[in-house]
Image (cartoon, rainbow, N blue to C red):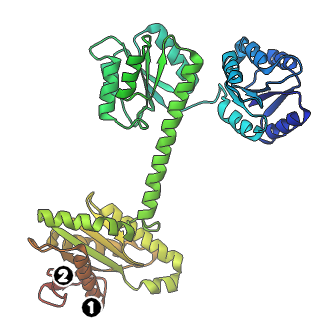
Amino acid sequence: MKVLFVDHSKVFRSVWERMVLHAGHDPLIATDGISGLRLLEHQTVDFIAVSLSLPDIDGIRFTRQVRTMPTCRGVPIVLLTSAQDNRTRRLAFEAGATDICPKTGIEDLFQRASRMARHDDQQLSGRVLYVEDSRTVFKLMIRLMESLGLGVDHFVSAADAFEHFDDKLHDLVISDILVEGEMSGIALVSQLRERHPDKMRTPILAMSGLDDDIRRVELFRLGINDFIPKPVIREEAAARIRNLVVQKQLFDKVQQQRIQLYEMAMTDPLTGLYNRNSLAEFAAKITSAANRHDMDLSVIILDLDHFKEINDQHGHLVGDQALASVGAMLTASCREEDFAVRFGGEEMLLILPHCPLSDAENRAHGLRERIENLRPAGIKVTASLGVSSRPPGRPIILEQLIRLADQAVYEAKSHGRNQVVVHGSLGRPSGPGARAVSAA
């Protein structure tokens, strides 16, 4: 970024030059207005800071002359002054100043320069859905958006544009509000907002040659994010398009980060299964739905056999590999509605909605065999599994099923491990409602 600083004070010039260089930018320094104007005749800059008080022409006159230069029409100009009266402000803005800043706030000024200055070659990425039936306008706008690095899907018809809009593909919608056809641009805005009410996820930029206040207010009420009057000023259109695309993509990034943070909070990093935080959040919903609709609900708990010996003999890295392999296998075996949790150190839990006891038993046998055949890191791993199920017509809480399945795992361990014990009632697993099924 090239920054021009015009001030007669040697101290201010020195401070400004050091700050610009320290930030990795290119400072241009002038001691008076005439010198600054001569620099601008041969140099293109991204930002200008000029003192109101100069030894030759004042900052307002300097600003007025800069605005006559074709290369400086869109360059931000900040006027530095200790006089913050309304008359000075009015004269500065009439001359073309972008803003006024006190000379004592030079550090804030530099931060403002970094925010306000924009490189024309700073490329965006993304895709725009564009609706315009004027050949002259759409050729200009498509060239502009492509120069910004954006892909463009152009439609003459608003109805065709609405049909092809994809909220996962398009970062911005731009539409003339008076396009020909059965659907107007206004109707397009209305239907897009009805389907996609979130203005940050689906920004809309409206354009019109009819720039009356009532129509513009109505468009904002319908849900547009911004408005450009025709004829289009290229620099204004570029700035508005850039702002909307960047804001939308930043919002998407924040939303994705929120999802990732939520998943990190609810997922066990080693096995990829849900953790007990997830179980606490969803347990009540799962059992409530099962009780309300009297639907089948089963639970499987599996506990890896002799896991302490695996860690002692082969090391914790091998133990972790065994857990990760079993976790991946469980994830692959789950239906969409199943809920797989790392319940403890080497203990994992499967919650199976719409799954009767007989099906849960068959799944437990299949899991036992698959674990035995995994052989992570070349070692044999087996598991003891306990199964329980919600009795039809009887309301329960999930903790009851988990407790029964855990008792069944204990019985499987006590009978030699590497087997499945099914607990078919709410009594003790050793009673008539339980049966042990050996690996053989």
Viewer-proximal residue, 194 or 420?
Answer: 194
Viewer-proximal residue, 15 or 130?
Answer: 15
Q: Which amino acid type is marked by label 1? A: His
Element assignment for label 2:
strand
Q: Position of residue 124 (x, y in %)?
A: 56, 31
Q: Against 403, is 190 above or below?
A: above
CA distance for labels 2 and 1:
15 Å
Residue on which disc 2 sits: 423
Q: Position of residue 32 (x, y in %)?
A: 87, 21
Q: Residue at x 15, y 80 (%)?
A: 424
Q: Residue at x 63, y 30 (%)?
A: 122
Residue on which disc 1 sits: 415
Element assignment for label 1:
loop
Q: Position of residue 180 (x, y in %)?
A: 33, 10
- How many labels, in total? 2
Tag 2–tag 1 contact (CB < 8 Å)? no
For mark 2, does the 10 Å Cα neighbourhood hold few (<14), some (14 to 19), or many (20 or more) residues? many
Give the numbered dot on residue 217.
Answer: none
